[in-house]
Protein backbone atom coordinates (compact mmCIF):
# COMPACT_ATOMS: atom_id res chain seq x y z
CA UNK A 1 0.00 0.00 0.00
CA UNK A 2 1.25 3.47 -0.92
CA UNK A 3 1.99 5.66 2.06
CA UNK A 4 -0.34 8.62 2.54
CA UNK A 5 1.49 11.53 4.14
CA UNK A 6 -0.78 14.18 5.65
CA UNK A 7 1.55 15.67 8.26
CA UNK A 8 3.12 18.50 6.28
CA UNK A 9 2.85 20.91 9.21
CA UNK A 10 5.41 18.71 11.01
CA UNK A 11 7.79 18.67 8.08
CA UNK A 12 7.74 18.49 4.30
CA UNK A 13 9.83 16.47 1.87
CA UNK A 14 12.59 18.44 0.19
CA UNK A 15 11.64 19.58 -3.31
CA UNK A 16 13.53 18.35 -6.34
CA UNK A 17 14.50 21.95 -7.20
CA UNK A 18 15.91 22.55 -3.70
CA UNK A 19 17.79 19.26 -3.71
CA UNK A 20 19.32 19.89 -7.14
CA UNK A 21 20.39 23.40 -6.13
CA UNK A 22 21.96 22.04 -2.94
CA UNK A 23 23.81 19.21 -4.63
CA UNK A 24 25.36 21.53 -7.19
CA UNK A 25 26.24 23.92 -4.38
CA UNK A 26 28.01 21.15 -2.43
CA UNK A 27 29.77 20.02 -5.61
CA UNK A 28 30.82 23.38 -7.03
CA UNK A 29 30.60 26.11 -4.39
CA UNK A 30 31.69 24.48 -1.18
CA UNK A 31 34.24 27.06 -0.07
CA UNK A 32 34.02 29.16 3.06
CA UNK A 33 32.11 32.34 2.13
CA UNK A 34 34.44 34.38 4.34
CA UNK A 35 37.51 33.35 2.31
CA UNK A 36 38.72 35.92 -0.20
CA UNK A 37 40.02 33.52 -2.89
CA UNK A 38 37.65 32.75 -5.78
CA UNK A 39 36.27 29.51 -4.26
CA UNK A 40 35.20 31.42 -1.16
CA UNK A 41 33.85 34.33 -3.13
CA UNK A 42 31.81 31.95 -5.25
CA UNK A 43 30.18 30.66 -2.08
CA UNK A 44 29.64 34.20 -0.90
CA UNK A 45 27.95 34.96 -4.20
CA UNK A 46 25.65 31.95 -3.90
CA UNK A 47 24.75 32.95 -0.35
CA UNK A 48 23.92 36.52 -1.33
CA UNK A 49 21.85 35.31 -4.27
CA UNK A 50 19.84 33.17 -1.86
CA UNK A 51 19.44 36.15 0.48
CA UNK A 52 18.13 38.32 -2.37
CA UNK A 53 15.64 35.60 -3.37
CA UNK A 54 14.35 35.28 0.20
CA UNK A 55 14.07 39.06 0.53
CA UNK A 56 12.22 39.38 -2.76
CA UNK A 57 9.70 36.71 -1.78
CA UNK A 58 8.97 38.49 1.50
CA UNK A 59 9.03 42.02 -0.02
CA UNK A 60 11.98 42.81 2.25
CA UNK A 61 15.45 44.21 1.65
CA UNK A 62 18.27 41.68 1.44
CA UNK A 63 20.02 43.45 4.35
CA UNK A 64 16.97 42.57 6.47
CA UNK A 65 17.47 38.80 6.04
CA UNK A 66 19.67 36.79 8.44
CA UNK A 67 20.15 33.07 7.87
CA UNK A 68 19.62 30.85 10.90
CA UNK A 69 19.35 27.16 11.76
CA UNK A 70 15.54 27.30 11.65
CA UNK A 71 12.41 28.46 13.40
CA UNK A 72 13.49 27.53 16.89
CA UNK A 73 16.65 29.63 16.66
CA UNK A 74 14.83 32.61 15.14
CA UNK A 75 12.28 32.67 17.95
CA UNK A 76 14.93 32.24 20.65
CA UNK A 77 17.01 34.96 19.05
CA UNK A 78 14.31 37.63 18.95
CA UNK A 79 12.87 37.09 22.41
CA UNK A 80 16.13 36.74 24.28
CA UNK A 81 17.84 39.38 22.10
CA UNK A 82 15.26 42.08 22.70
CA UNK A 83 15.24 41.19 26.40
CA UNK A 84 19.02 41.46 26.55
CA UNK A 85 18.99 44.81 24.75
CA UNK A 86 16.41 46.27 27.14
CA UNK A 87 17.65 44.63 30.33
CA UNK A 88 14.24 44.58 31.99
CA UNK A 89 10.57 44.97 31.22
CA UNK A 90 7.37 43.30 30.09
CA UNK A 91 6.72 41.02 27.10
CA UNK A 92 3.33 40.22 25.58
CA UNK A 93 2.86 36.92 23.77
CA UNK A 94 0.06 34.35 23.49
CA UNK A 95 -0.85 31.04 25.08
CA UNK A 96 -0.92 29.36 21.64
CA UNK A 97 2.68 29.96 20.55
CA UNK A 98 5.12 27.25 19.56
CA UNK A 99 7.25 25.97 22.45
CA UNK A 100 10.31 27.76 21.09
CA UNK A 101 8.55 31.01 22.02
CA UNK A 102 6.85 29.77 25.20
CA UNK A 103 9.96 28.19 26.72
CA UNK A 104 12.11 31.20 25.88
CA UNK A 105 9.50 33.44 27.49
CA UNK A 106 9.46 31.20 30.57
CA UNK A 107 13.23 31.46 30.87
CA UNK A 108 13.00 35.25 30.63
CA UNK A 109 10.45 35.18 33.45
CA UNK A 110 12.98 33.32 35.57
CA UNK A 111 15.42 36.13 34.77
CA UNK A 112 13.06 38.80 36.09
CA UNK A 113 11.10 39.78 32.98
CA UNK A 114 7.32 39.84 33.17
CA UNK A 115 5.33 38.03 30.50
CA UNK A 116 1.63 38.28 29.66
CA UNK A 117 0.16 35.32 27.74
CA UNK A 118 -2.91 36.43 25.79
CA UNK A 119 -5.73 33.87 25.65
CA UNK A 120 -7.33 33.35 22.21
CA UNK A 121 -11.04 33.03 21.52
CA UNK A 122 -12.71 29.75 20.59
CA UNK A 123 -11.37 30.03 17.01
CA UNK A 124 -7.80 30.84 17.99
CA UNK A 125 -7.90 34.60 17.37
CA UNK A 126 -6.23 37.27 19.46
CA UNK A 127 -8.27 40.50 19.33
CA UNK A 128 -6.48 43.86 18.88
CA UNK A 129 -8.43 45.22 21.90
CA UNK A 130 -7.06 42.39 24.00
CA UNK A 131 -3.51 43.26 23.01
CA UNK A 132 -4.19 46.95 23.63
CA UNK A 133 -5.37 46.17 27.16
CA UNK A 134 -2.26 44.09 27.90
CA UNK A 135 0.30 46.71 26.88
CA UNK A 136 2.12 48.61 29.62
CA UNK A 137 4.54 51.52 29.68
CA UNK A 138 7.36 49.02 30.24
CA UNK A 139 6.33 46.58 27.46
CA UNK A 140 9.42 45.89 25.35
CA UNK A 141 8.13 43.34 22.81
CA UNK A 142 4.96 41.79 21.41
CA UNK A 143 5.25 38.31 19.88
CA UNK A 144 2.18 36.80 18.20
CA UNK A 145 2.43 33.97 15.67
CA UNK A 146 1.05 34.49 12.17
CA UNK A 147 -0.57 31.09 11.59
CA UNK A 148 -1.09 28.48 14.27
CA UNK A 149 0.52 25.07 13.80
CA UNK A 150 -2.18 23.11 15.64
CA UNK A 151 -5.43 24.59 14.31
CA UNK A 152 -4.26 26.68 11.32
CA UNK A 153 -5.95 29.95 12.31
CA UNK A 154 -4.36 33.01 10.65
CA UNK A 155 -4.22 36.11 12.86
CA UNK A 156 -5.10 39.60 11.69
CA UNK A 157 -1.44 40.53 12.12
CA UNK A 158 -1.57 44.05 10.57
CA UNK A 159 -4.25 45.06 13.11
CA UNK A 160 -2.17 43.68 16.00
CA UNK A 161 0.99 45.38 14.73
CA UNK A 162 -0.86 48.69 14.56
CA UNK A 163 -1.74 48.46 18.26
CA UNK A 164 1.86 47.74 19.28
CA UNK A 165 3.33 50.40 17.00
CA UNK A 166 0.95 53.06 18.33
CA UNK A 167 3.04 52.74 21.50
CA UNK A 168 6.38 52.29 19.72
CA UNK A 169 6.65 48.66 20.81
CA UNK A 170 8.41 46.26 18.38
CA UNK A 171 6.40 43.34 17.02
CA UNK A 172 7.66 39.82 16.31
CA UNK A 173 5.74 37.14 14.47
CA UNK A 174 6.53 33.43 14.21
CA UNK A 175 5.56 32.88 10.58
CA UNK A 176 6.98 29.37 10.28
CA UNK A 177 3.63 27.83 9.29
CA UNK A 178 2.71 30.68 6.98
CA UNK A 179 5.78 31.29 4.81
CA UNK A 180 5.51 29.40 1.53
CA UNK A 181 1.83 28.68 2.21
CA UNK A 182 0.16 32.09 2.11
CA UNK A 183 1.39 35.35 0.53
CA UNK A 184 3.69 37.26 2.89
CA UNK A 185 4.52 40.92 2.50
CA UNK A 186 6.52 42.14 5.48
CA UNK A 187 5.72 45.76 4.63
CA UNK A 188 2.00 45.12 4.62
CA UNK A 189 2.24 43.01 7.79
CA UNK A 190 4.27 45.74 9.45
CA UNK A 191 6.11 43.32 11.76
CA UNK A 192 9.61 44.24 12.90
CA UNK A 193 10.81 40.65 13.22
CA UNK A 194 9.59 37.57 11.36
CA UNK A 195 10.77 34.00 11.86
CA UNK A 196 10.70 31.37 9.09
CA UNK A 197 11.94 27.83 8.60
CA UNK A 198 12.84 26.03 5.34
CA UNK A 199 11.69 22.50 6.15
CA UNK A 200 8.07 23.61 6.51
CA UNK A 201 7.98 24.61 2.82
CA UNK A 202 9.98 21.84 1.09
CA UNK A 203 13.40 23.24 1.91
CA UNK A 204 16.12 21.46 3.91
CA UNK A 205 15.86 20.86 7.66
CA UNK A 206 18.03 22.90 10.00
CA UNK A 207 17.86 26.09 7.91
CA UNK A 208 15.76 29.19 8.36
CA UNK A 209 15.87 32.94 8.35
CA UNK A 210 15.00 35.89 10.49
CA UNK A 211 13.62 39.03 8.92
CA UNK A 212 14.75 42.00 10.97
CA UNK A 213 13.47 45.41 9.85
CA UNK A 214 16.31 47.76 9.02
CA UNK A 215 15.33 50.25 11.71
CA UNK A 216 15.32 47.54 14.39
CA UNK A 217 18.30 45.97 16.04
CA UNK A 218 18.48 42.74 17.96
CA UNK A 219 21.77 41.70 19.57
CA UNK A 220 23.12 38.35 18.38
CA UNK A 221 22.25 35.11 20.13
CA UNK A 222 25.21 33.20 18.73
CA UNK A 223 28.65 34.76 19.10
CA UNK A 224 31.80 34.00 17.18
CA UNK A 225 33.34 35.01 13.88
CA UNK A 226 30.82 37.72 13.17
CA UNK A 227 29.20 36.20 10.10
CA UNK A 228 25.84 37.53 8.86
CA UNK A 229 27.06 41.09 9.45
CA UNK A 230 27.70 40.26 13.08
CA UNK A 231 24.13 39.11 13.59
CA UNK A 232 24.65 35.38 13.58
CA UNK A 233 28.08 33.82 13.88
CA UNK A 234 29.13 30.44 12.53
CA UNK A 235 30.29 29.39 9.08
CA UNK A 236 27.29 29.91 6.84
CA UNK A 237 25.27 26.91 5.65
CA UNK A 238 25.49 27.99 2.01
CA UNK A 239 23.89 24.87 0.46
CA UNK A 240 21.11 25.10 3.05
CA UNK A 241 20.38 28.73 2.26
CA UNK A 242 20.52 28.03 -1.47
CA UNK A 243 18.11 25.08 -1.07
CA UNK A 244 15.75 27.17 1.05
CA UNK A 245 15.68 29.95 -1.54
CA UNK A 246 14.99 27.47 -4.36
CA UNK A 247 12.13 25.89 -2.38
CA UNK A 248 10.69 29.29 -1.50
CA UNK A 249 10.75 30.52 -5.12
CA UNK A 250 9.03 27.34 -6.23
CA UNK A 251 6.29 27.73 -3.58
CA UNK A 252 5.65 31.34 -4.55
CA UNK A 253 5.47 30.56 -8.26
CA UNK A 254 2.61 28.11 -7.68
CA UNK A 255 0.95 29.79 -4.72
CA UNK A 256 -2.41 30.82 -6.22
CA UNK A 257 -2.97 27.54 -7.98
CA UNK A 258 -1.83 25.50 -4.97
CA UNK A 259 -4.05 27.46 -2.59
CA UNK A 260 -7.12 26.82 -4.75
CA UNK A 261 -6.29 23.12 -4.99
CA UNK A 262 -5.57 22.72 -1.27
CA UNK A 263 -8.68 24.61 -0.24
CA UNK A 264 -10.80 22.22 -2.28
CA UNK A 265 -8.98 19.19 -0.90
CA UNK A 266 -9.26 20.44 2.69
CA UNK A 267 -12.99 21.10 2.30
CA UNK A 268 -13.50 17.58 0.99
CA UNK A 269 -11.65 16.18 4.01
CA UNK A 270 -13.49 18.47 6.43
CA UNK A 271 -16.91 17.54 5.03
CA UNK A 272 -16.09 13.85 5.29
CA UNK A 273 -14.64 14.10 8.80
CA UNK A 274 -17.40 16.24 10.29
CA UNK A 275 -20.00 13.83 8.86
CA UNK A 276 -18.68 11.27 11.36
CA UNK A 277 -20.71 11.51 14.59
CA UNK A 278 -18.78 13.20 17.40
CA UNK A 279 -16.15 14.81 15.16
CA UNK A 280 -15.84 18.61 14.91
CA UNK A 281 -13.51 21.06 13.22
CA UNK A 282 -11.27 23.32 15.32
CA UNK A 283 -9.95 26.75 14.37
CA UNK A 284 -11.67 29.31 12.22
CA UNK A 285 -13.61 27.70 9.34
CA UNK A 286 -12.39 30.26 6.78
CA UNK A 287 -9.41 32.31 7.97
CA UNK A 288 -6.98 29.41 8.10
CA UNK A 289 -4.04 27.80 6.35
CA UNK A 290 -5.29 26.28 3.08
CA UNK A 291 -4.05 22.75 3.76
CA UNK A 292 -4.50 22.38 7.50
CA UNK A 293 -7.56 20.78 9.06
CA UNK A 294 -7.75 19.87 12.74
CA UNK A 295 -10.56 18.02 14.44
CA UNK A 296 -11.65 16.90 17.85
CA UNK A 297 -12.85 13.33 18.06
CA UNK A 298 -15.14 12.88 21.04
CA UNK A 299 -15.31 9.78 23.19
CA UNK A 300 -11.72 8.60 22.95
CA UNK A 301 -9.00 8.63 25.62
CA UNK A 302 -6.38 10.18 23.33
CA UNK A 303 -6.09 10.74 19.58
CA UNK A 304 -2.64 9.13 19.68
CA UNK A 305 -4.51 5.80 19.49
CA UNK A 306 -6.04 6.89 16.17
CA UNK A 307 -2.72 8.24 14.92
CA UNK A 308 -1.08 4.94 15.84
CA UNK A 309 -3.79 2.83 14.16
CA UNK A 310 -3.64 4.97 11.01
CA UNK A 311 0.15 4.70 11.07
CA UNK A 312 -0.22 0.94 10.88
CA UNK A 313 -2.15 1.48 7.66
CA UNK A 314 0.62 3.74 6.28
CA UNK A 315 -1.41 6.92 6.86
CA UNK A 316 0.59 9.69 8.55
CA UNK A 317 -1.36 12.29 10.52
CA UNK A 318 -0.74 14.04 13.83
CA UNK A 319 -2.45 14.29 17.18
CA UNK A 320 -1.74 18.03 17.12
CA UNK A 321 0.55 18.00 20.09
CA UNK A 322 3.95 16.56 20.78
CA UNK A 323 3.05 13.15 22.09
CA UNK A 324 3.33 9.45 21.65
CA UNK A 325 0.99 6.68 22.67
CA UNK A 326 3.11 6.39 25.79
CA UNK A 327 3.05 9.99 26.97
CA UNK A 328 -0.36 11.48 26.41
CA UNK A 329 -0.78 15.19 26.75
CA UNK A 330 -3.40 17.61 25.55
CA UNK A 331 -2.36 20.43 23.25
CA UNK A 332 -1.78 23.70 25.13
CA UNK A 333 -3.27 25.44 22.10
CA UNK A 334 -6.65 23.69 22.34
CA UNK A 335 -6.75 24.15 26.11
CA UNK A 336 -6.08 27.87 25.63
CA UNK A 337 -8.90 27.99 23.06
CA UNK A 338 -11.28 26.85 25.77
CA UNK A 339 -11.61 23.14 25.07
CA UNK A 340 -11.66 21.02 28.19
CA UNK A 341 -8.93 18.47 28.82
CA UNK A 342 -10.97 15.52 27.58
CA UNK A 343 -11.90 17.25 24.31
CA UNK A 344 -8.33 18.47 23.75
CA UNK A 345 -7.09 14.87 24.13
CA UNK A 346 -9.08 13.97 21.01
CA UNK A 347 -7.28 16.36 18.65
CA UNK A 348 -6.44 15.03 15.21
CA UNK A 349 -4.50 17.17 12.71
CA UNK A 350 -4.27 16.66 8.95
CA UNK A 351 -1.92 18.93 7.04
CA UNK A 352 -2.22 18.54 3.29
CA UNK A 353 0.08 19.46 0.48
CA UNK A 354 -0.22 19.59 -3.31
CA UNK A 355 1.29 16.11 -3.45
CA UNK A 356 -1.92 14.81 -1.81
CA UNK A 357 -4.84 13.79 -4.02
CA UNK A 358 -8.62 13.47 -3.80
CA UNK A 359 -8.19 9.69 -3.96
CA UNK A 360 -5.96 9.83 -0.89
CA UNK A 361 -8.52 11.93 0.99
CA UNK A 362 -11.22 9.45 0.03
CA UNK A 363 -9.08 6.52 1.11
CA UNK A 364 -8.50 8.15 4.50
CA UNK A 365 -12.21 8.92 4.85
CA UNK A 366 -13.00 5.30 4.03
CA UNK A 367 -10.89 3.87 6.86
CA UNK A 368 -11.20 6.51 9.55
CA UNK A 369 -14.77 5.87 10.80
CA UNK A 370 -13.83 2.26 11.49
CA UNK A 371 -10.64 3.27 13.29
CA UNK A 372 -12.55 5.76 15.45
CA UNK A 373 -15.17 3.09 16.26
CA UNK A 374 -12.42 0.68 17.23
CA UNK A 375 -10.74 3.17 19.56
CA UNK A 376 -14.07 4.19 21.09
CA UNK A 377 -14.99 0.55 21.68
CA UNK A 378 -11.69 -0.11 23.43
CA UNK A 379 -12.10 3.04 25.47
CA UNK A 380 -12.68 1.34 28.81
CA UNK A 381 -9.58 -0.82 28.66
CA UNK A 382 -7.46 2.07 27.35
CA UNK A 383 -8.52 4.31 30.19
CA UNK A 384 -7.96 1.56 32.71
C1 LIG B 1 8.04 23.98 13.18
C2 LIG B 1 7.75 25.24 13.89
C3 LIG B 1 8.76 25.94 14.58
C4 LIG B 1 10.16 25.38 14.71
O1 LIG B 1 10.87 25.43 13.52
P1 LIG B 1 12.19 24.51 13.37
O2 LIG B 1 12.81 25.00 12.10
O3 LIG B 1 11.71 23.10 13.27
O4 LIG B 1 13.05 24.76 14.54
C5 LIG B 1 8.45 27.14 15.17
N1 LIG B 1 7.21 27.65 15.10
C6 LIG B 1 6.21 27.02 14.45
C7 LIG B 1 4.86 27.63 14.40
C8 LIG B 1 6.44 25.80 13.84
O5 LIG B 1 5.44 25.17 13.21
Image (cartoon, helix red, strand yellow):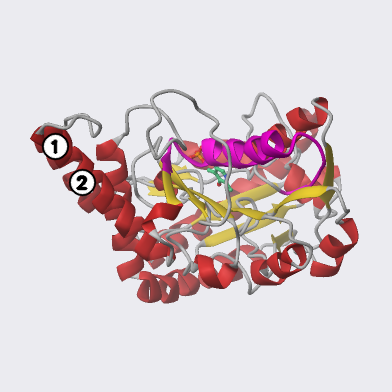
Q: Is residue 304 visible?
A: no
Q: Quadrant of the C terminus?
A: top right
Image coordinates of residue 313 in percent, x first then y, are: 45, 41
Q: Is residue 256 left or right of residue 38?
A: right
Q: Could you say which quadrant of the image residue 56 lies in? A: bottom left
Q: Distance between the Cα atoms at labels 1 and 2?
A: 8 Å
Image coordinates of residue 112 in percent, x first then y, are: 84, 29
Q: Residue at x 64, y 32 (%)?
A: 323
What kind of element bears circle 2? helix
Q: Could you say which quadrant of the image residue 104 lies in? A: top right
* Label 1 sits on residue: 29
**How busy is the neighbourhood of tag 2: few (under 14 within 10 Å), some, or many (20 plus)?**
many
Image coordinates of residue 193 in percent, x first then y, are: 57, 53
Q: Is residue 215 left or right of residue 361?
A: right
Image coordinates of residue 161 in percent, x first then y, are: 69, 65
Considering depth in this image, is 249 or 215 the residue closer to the camera?
215
User: Which mark is drawn over residue 46?
Assistant: 2
Q: Is residue 267 left or right of residue 301?
A: left
* 88 within the magenta span: yes
Q: Is residue 97 visible?
A: yes
User: Which badge, 1 or 2, comes first in the chain's sequence?
Assistant: 1
Task: Please tell me in which quarter of the rendered image ligand 1 is found.
Answer: top right
**Magenta region: which residues?**
67-96
State whether residue 241 is above or below residue 249: above
**How busy is the neighbourhood of tag 1: few (under 14 within 10 Å), some, or many (20 plus)?**
many
State whether residue 231 is above or below residue 61: above
Amino acid sequence: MERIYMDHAATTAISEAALTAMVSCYRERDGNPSAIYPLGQDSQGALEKARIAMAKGLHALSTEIFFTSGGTEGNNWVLSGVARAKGRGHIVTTAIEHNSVLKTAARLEEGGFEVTYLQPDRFGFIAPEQLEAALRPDTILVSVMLANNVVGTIQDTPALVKVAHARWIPFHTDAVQAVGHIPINVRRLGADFLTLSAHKFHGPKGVGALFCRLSNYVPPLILGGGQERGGRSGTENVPGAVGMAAAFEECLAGLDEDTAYLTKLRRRLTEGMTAIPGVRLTGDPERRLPGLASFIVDGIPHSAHIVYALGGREICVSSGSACSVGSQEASHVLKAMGFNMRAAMGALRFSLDVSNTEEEVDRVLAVIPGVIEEVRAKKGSLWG
